[in-house]
Image (tube, rainbow, N blue to C red):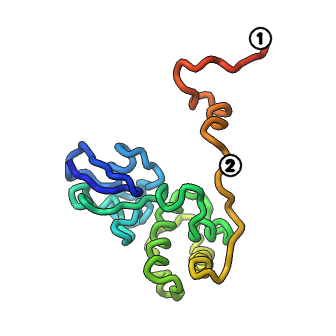
């Protein structure tokens, strides 16, 4: 059973070692921010960081990932405060959002290596396909995230999620615990 560290937590997958990392993350670990797009490494929507490098999780097996450190979009920042996430929102470089997690992971890996990348370096490091065509804004967002990383700028966009699990359960009945007493006080 392959073992690895995912988002700073040790995990062991009781799955076929030839299972793509993508499916182990989505199906076994319930980390659904990593998206399935093409299944053959062309689109980049399944991008994660493996030992700090951006890799397409549909192309590596859990056997190949054994003993490595995996970071998914969920592990990048729990409160959306990572400079890449903040800059993508501030520069309006998100449209439908399907490719966004993979783009954010590729950009975060780039900025970890080089906090001041040129436009050419950004274009080379972000192989992701985006059907919405956010590429010009994407370059600006990554440049801006680099400035934030270097502490040359701050961003006040993209506030952290403001709903607690308890409030979510009140708003979404499907999230209520099984057997919980009803809170309905109406006189129906």
Instruction: Please state the horizontal and vertical placement of residue 187, each as a whole percent of the image.
Output: 79, 11
Q: Nearer the viewer, mark 1 or mark 2?
A: 2
Please tell me whether residue 24 is drawn above or below residue 83 in the rendered image: above
Instruction: Please state the horizontal and vertical placement of residue 39, each as a whole percent of the image.
Output: 34, 57
Question: What number of labels is visible?
Answer: 2
Which residue is outermost to the top? 188
Disc on the earlier residue, 1 or 2: 2
Look at 51% across and 86% down and name the residue there: 117
Look at 37% across and 50% down and name the residue there: 25
**Quadrant in the picture for residue 48:** bottom left
Mark 2 neighbour density, 10 Å: few (under 14) some (14–19) many (20 or more): few
Instruction: Please state the horizontal and vertical placement of residue 103, each as a whole percent of the image.
Output: 49, 67
Mark 1 neighbour density, 10 Å: few (under 14) some (14–19) many (20 or more): few
Image side of residue 137 versus residue 178, left or right: right
Check the picture and name the quadrant holding the C terminus: top right
Look at 49% across and 87% down and name the residue there: 120
Instruction: Please state the horizontal and vertical placement of residue 163, each as a whole percent of the image.
Output: 66, 44
| Residue identifier under label 2 | 162
Q: SS for tag 2?
A: loop
| Residue identifier under label 1 | 188
Q: SS for tag 1?
A: loop
Which residue is outermost to the right? 187
């Amino acid at each position: 059973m392959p073992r690895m560290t995912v988002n700073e937590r040790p995990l062991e997958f009781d799955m076929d070692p030839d299972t793509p990392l993508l499916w182990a993350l989505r199906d076994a670990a319930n980390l659904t921010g990593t998206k399935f797009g093409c299944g053959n490494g062309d689109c980049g929507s399944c991008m994660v960081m493996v030992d700090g490098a951006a890799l397409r999780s549909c192309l590596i097996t859990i056997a190949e990932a054994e003993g490595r450190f995996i970071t998914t979009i969920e592990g990048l920042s729990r409160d959306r405060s990572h400079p890449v996430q903040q800059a993508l929102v501030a520069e309006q470089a998100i449209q439908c959002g399907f490719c966004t997690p993979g783009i954010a992971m590729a950009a975060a890996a780039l900025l970890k290596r080089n906090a001041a990348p040129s436009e050419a370096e950004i274009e080379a490091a972000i192989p992701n396909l985006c059907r919405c065509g956010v590429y010009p804004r994407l370059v600006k967002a990554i440049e801006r995230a680099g400035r934030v990383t270097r502490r040359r700028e701050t961003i006040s966009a993209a506030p952290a999620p403001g709903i607690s699990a308890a409030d979510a359960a009140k708003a979404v009945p499907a999230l209520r615990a099984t057997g919980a007493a009803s809170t309905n006080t109406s006189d129906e």
